[in-house]
Structure formats: C-alpha cells, structure tokens
Image (cartoon, grey):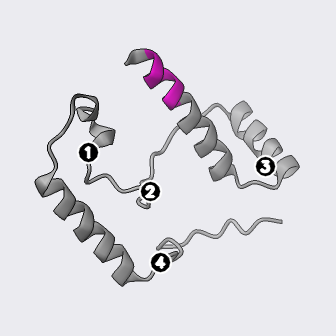
Amino acid sequence: MQNNKLSSRPPAKKPIEEFILAAEHKRRDHDYHKPKEEEMYPWNNPSIREDVQKVFTVKLPEEYILKIKFISDKTNKSQQKIVREIVCHEIDKIIEGLI
C-alpha cells in the first residue's frame, strides 16, 4: 500500500550547497549568453533549471483519476510519475508541431 501522507517539503536529493551553486552557475552563464534564434522560447532560457519542479494542479474527471490509479497499481509507478510522463510527452509532441 502506498503512503499518501503529504509533506510540507520535498525530499532532499542534493545538498543545499550544491543547489545554490547550480543556481549561481546558471545566473553567471545567463549574464554572458547571447540567445540564438532557436532559444527564443521561454523553456530555452538559460536560467531554467532541470532539477527544479513546480506544482501544477489539474482537475480531471473521476473516470481518469480511477484509470490513473489502476495504471499505478498495475505498473507500481506513482500516480504523479505516470501523469508527469504522459503530460511531458504530449506537450513535446504539440510543441514539435507548432515550431
């Protein structure tokens, strides 16, 4: 059974010093970086960090919540990971068609 207890802070994957150094490194790189044509999209901004994740709440019909739970139970993946993989993949497909 999964532990669905909410936490007030995310689990630490890196020491805080490493997180701060990475942020400073990105800021330094950004100061001297001249954007190219293909980098004009907001997600290509050099200050965007791969290790930072943000919460985005989505309302789904109950049917899909139950389907996600079913997939989670059968694959032993967290519901968060399942939805994140699907959403990211589909967003990339849509963006590819737009640019």
Instruction: Tell me the kind of residue under disc 2.
Output: Gln
Which residue is painted at 70% across and 33% down in the image?
64
Specify which label sits upstream in the sequence, 3 or 1.
1
Answer with left or right where residue 81 lies relative to residue 58. right
Q: Earlier in the sequence, mark 4 or mark 1?
A: 4
Q: Secondary structure at mark 2?
A: loop
Q: CA distance from mark 2 to mark 1?
A: 15 Å
Instruction: Compute the Cα span from label 3 to label 4.
Output: 27 Å
Cα separation, mark 4 vs mark 2, equals 14 Å
Magenta stretch, residue numbers: 91-97
Distance, label 3 to label 1, CA atoms, is: 34 Å
Picture coordinates of residue 68, whole percent (x, y):
73, 41
Locate residue 6, reporting x and y percent.
Answer: 58, 68
Which class describes the residues within 10 Å of circle 2: few (<14), some (14-19), or many (20+)? few
Q: Residue at x 51, y 39 (%)?
A: 58
**Circles 2 and 1: CB atoms closer than 8 Å:** no
Residue under circle 3? 72
